[in-house]
Amino acid sequence: MTDIRFGTDGWRGVIADDFTFANVRLAARAIARRVRAEAGGASPHVLVGYDTRFLSREFAQAAAQTMAAEGVRVSLAAAFAPTPAFSYAVVRLQAAGAVVITASHNPAEYSGVKCKAAYGGSAPVSFTRGVEEEIERIGAESRGPRAESKFEIRNSKFEIGTFDAREPWLDRLEELVPVAAIGRSGIRVVLDVMYGAGQGLLVERLRRAGCAVRELHGELNPGFGGLHPEPIPAYMGALVAATQEWRGPGPCVGFAFDGDSDRIAPVDEDGRVVTPHQVLALLVRHLVRNRRERGAVVKSVNIGRMVDLEAQALGVPLVVTPIGFKFVAAAMREQDALVGGEESGGFAVRGHIPERDPGLICLLLLECMAMTGKSLGTLVREMETEYGPHRYGRTDLRLATLADRDRVVARLTGAPPAALLSVPLLQMDTRDGVKLIRADQSWVMLRASGTEPLLRIYAEAPTEDEVRALLDWGQQLAAEKG
């Protein structure tokens, strides 16, 4: 039996290798039993959604049939949609949760399962651990007497319903950010949906409002046309080029979305990719200064200092969490926070759902441009004028084993250097991996991947050269201590 484990945001596997129909049904059966156990004997309602990957709808259908056979009322999405649209549907339809067939930003050969809770965010660790334990129990049952009957799909007393996740979600976004003013602003918008679940959706609403919009990679292609559907600079060449080359009146801006449209990366008018650190700081500035809202700001520990400085200048509290949006979302709910964000391009805003929703973030950044009459690049440069330049980098280093990976972090935590590249060490943060902060506030962070022998190395400094030097230092350290 495949070892099905739920990581930071779900279980993922290679299609036809470990991500098979049998394993999807196994996971769905375990999820259904956990949901029923938490419902206290009632018949909970669970939504099932899916993205644009190979066999996603068929996997979703198999999951829906399996859960219905376990006594759960199930509704299957009428079409693919962004993951945040399914999260919003959970709240709108007052469901017990959702199962989404998606591998998010992973390459095309992967698929996966995400679990959403009744509040519209990722299911807590307590739930996914319970699912893993249930999978173990089902596996034990299958090895017992009459094992052949254990995995049959029984007839369900509930018919599987359908629901629309797309239009209600888009309507909700327009309630939160009126798009008419964006349409009148003359901003030209390029959307790269990377062949993912956001294709054809936001582009139509912006056009209806009067925006000039172009969409890239907006057709069904389960192989993603050879593109890795992750909105990071390495895979954003087409968007950068399209934004730079589109000539016309008014500022131009681009946005890249990942495979299930729950992460975002903007590109300014000069083709520069705006980092997640800059995006979160700009969201804080817009929500507090322009929208006159107040509340705490939540960031993951690998987000840079520009957010800290903006929050301090505006007099709003700052909360720092371990890496993983489930931690950001939990802190947002506990603090009734205004906005939260993570380094991988996920952001949430109060008043919607405690979930990454790049559709909302795209509209808020466009609203900021429209309200100020400034380009995205100008807005970022204004912040850097106030707080100094911000440069950031990340590299993933594959080591031989998980033990090698963990050894690097453990040894650095146990014996941190007094100085890092001749600059004294000011502070060490160990809430997730190890983050070394120098006296000049630049930093480097080493963190083990949750599931692979990968060491993630992050760095922030005033210049690209300093960032590169810090990343190189981290790689050299890994070579020595691994």
Image (cartoon, rainbow, N blue to C red):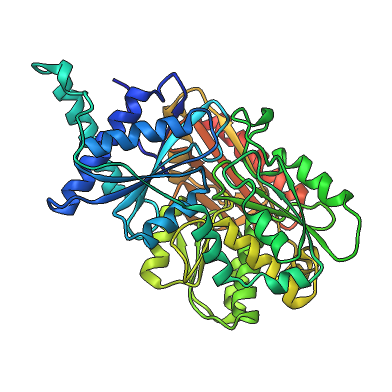
Foreground: 393 or 405?
A: 393
Q: Residue at x 27, y 40 (%)?
A: 31
**Quadrant of image for the N terminus:** top left
**Residue 473 shows in the view:** yes
Query: Is any part of residue 430 visible from this angle?
Result: no
Q: In the picture, residue 407 is in which quadrant?
A: top left
Q: In the shown orientation, is residue 315 left or right of residue 337? A: right
Q: Quadrant of residue 90?
A: bottom left
Residue at position x 53%, y 57% from top? 167
On screen, residue 432 versus residue 268, left or right, reads: left
Q: Residue at x 43, y 19 (%)?
A: 17
Residue 452 image position (x, y, % from top left): 46, 30
Image height check: is 405 above or below 340? above
Instruction: Report the residue that reaches farthest toward the left.
Output: 145
- Residue sitting at x 27%, y 33%: 66
| Residue 281, horizontal then vertical, whole percent | 63, 67
For this view, does 458 lie left or right of residue 211? left
Q: Nearer the viewer, residue 230 or 395?
A: 230
Q: Percent position (x, y) of residue 309?
A: 62, 72
